[in-house]
Image (cartoon, rainbow, N blue to C red):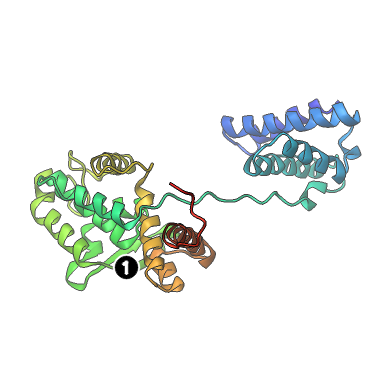
């Protein structure tokens, strides 16, 4: 029976690897189904009887069940890790699963606002003439104007902002720093907030730029709620998040002719392939424009 091996592996994940309960449960469920397939279809009693074609057949069964590539890829990762463990325990001689490629997964395109939707959101953020309203407008203008990650935005200190030089100093992933230009709209909104908003939020820490109503640094959830409320106010039906502003920044830059390398620098991407994802969004946008505007585009009759 193969089940005792699974119990030993689960113990290994819990004690040696110290994985979370949810992660272990995910591995366990994936492998239960896999081992049941081997026992039911091939009546294997030992894992050294399993060959590459048996694993491929299991993957083929998952595809026939219309399982999405992302889920298949996860199950294959679980199986690969299990076989690697068995090899380390000298139960099998080689990890046959390492030779099986993961199914190609198509990443869903991130939600992007078009220019008209973006302007509506920005306008909605500028209507409330209160300290919190000035803060919200400054955060929205800066997030979109500089293409910041939400963590980069909320962790800004006043010393990171150089309004007279039209620059902001960003600390990104891996504590890597970059300098991003600031546009006139962002500068105006930040200055308004610093002068007429922030002092009235009774700051607990003097250096923190964006504060919540208690005077402490605003949280990711806090900014998420701001975005959600402003989206409703602006009549935006798309499901958006703080990261949507970063996606929209990159897409609008590329649509308006910005160099891919320049956008990579602005976003702080290590790999230009990550930035290239936004070219797919731009192409999607161009296809929509063409389909709508060109008289020979086989548009459906309305």
Residue 199, percent from left and from top: 10, 49
118 or 172, which is in the foreground?
Answer: 118
Residue 59, percent from left and from top: 76, 40
Question: In the rendered image, which residue does mark 1 sit on?
Answer: 180
Residue 65, percent from left and from top: 72, 33
| Quadrant of res 61 | top right
Residue 114, percent from left and from top: 35, 55
Name the residue located 88 percent from the left edge and 43 percent from the top edge.
Answer: 51
73 or 298, which is in the foreground?
Answer: 298
Name the residue located 14 percent from the left edge and 60 percent from the top edge.
Answer: 191
Q: Is residue 130 left or right of residue 293?
A: left
Q: Is residue 123 left or right of residue 174?
A: left
Assign a secondary structure to mark 1. strand
The quarter in which the N terminus is drawn is top right
Name the residue located 26 percent from the left edge and 58 percent from the top edge.
Answer: 142
Residue 109 visible? The answer is yes
19 or 76, which is in the foreground?
Answer: 76
Q: Is residue 243 left or right of residue 70?
A: left
């Amino acid at each position: 029976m193969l089940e005792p091996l699974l119990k030993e592996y689960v113990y290994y994940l819990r004690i040696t690897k110290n994985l979370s309960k949810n992660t272990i449960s995910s591995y366990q469920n994936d492998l239960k189904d896999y081992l049941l397939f081997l026992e039911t279809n091939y009546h294997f009693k030992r894992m050294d009887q399993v060959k590459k074609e048996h694993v491929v057949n299991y993957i083929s069964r998952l595809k026939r069940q219309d399982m999405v590539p992302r889920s298949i890829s996860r199950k294959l990762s679980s199986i690969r890790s299990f076989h690697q463990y068995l090899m380390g325990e000298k139960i099998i001689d080689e990890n046959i699963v390492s030779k099986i490629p993961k199914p190609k997964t198509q990443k869903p395109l991130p939600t992007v606002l078009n220019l008209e939707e973006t302007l509506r959101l920005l306008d909605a953020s500028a209507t409330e003439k209160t300290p919190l309203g000035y803060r919200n407008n400054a955060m929205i203008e800066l997030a979109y104007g500089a293409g910041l990650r939400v963590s980069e935005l909320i962790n800004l200190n006043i010393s990171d902002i150089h309004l007279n030089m039209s620059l902001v100093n960003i600390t990104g992933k891996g504590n890597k720093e970059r300098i991003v230009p600031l546009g006139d709209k962002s500068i105006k909104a930040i200055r308004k907030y610093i002068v007429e908003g922030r002092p009235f939020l009774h700051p607990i820490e003097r250096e923190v730029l964006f504060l919540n109503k208690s005077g402490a640094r605003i949280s990711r959830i806090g900014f998420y709620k701001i975005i959600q409320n402003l989206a409703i106010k602006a009549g935006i039906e798309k499901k958006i998040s703080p990261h949507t502003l970063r996606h929209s920044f990159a897409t609008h830059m590329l649509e308006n002719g910005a160099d891919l390398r320049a956008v990579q620098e602005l976003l702080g991407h290590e790999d230009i392939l990550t930035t290239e994802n936004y070219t797919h969004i731009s192409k999607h946008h161009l296809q929509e424009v063409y389909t709508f505007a060109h008289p020979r585009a086989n548009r459906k009759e309305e």
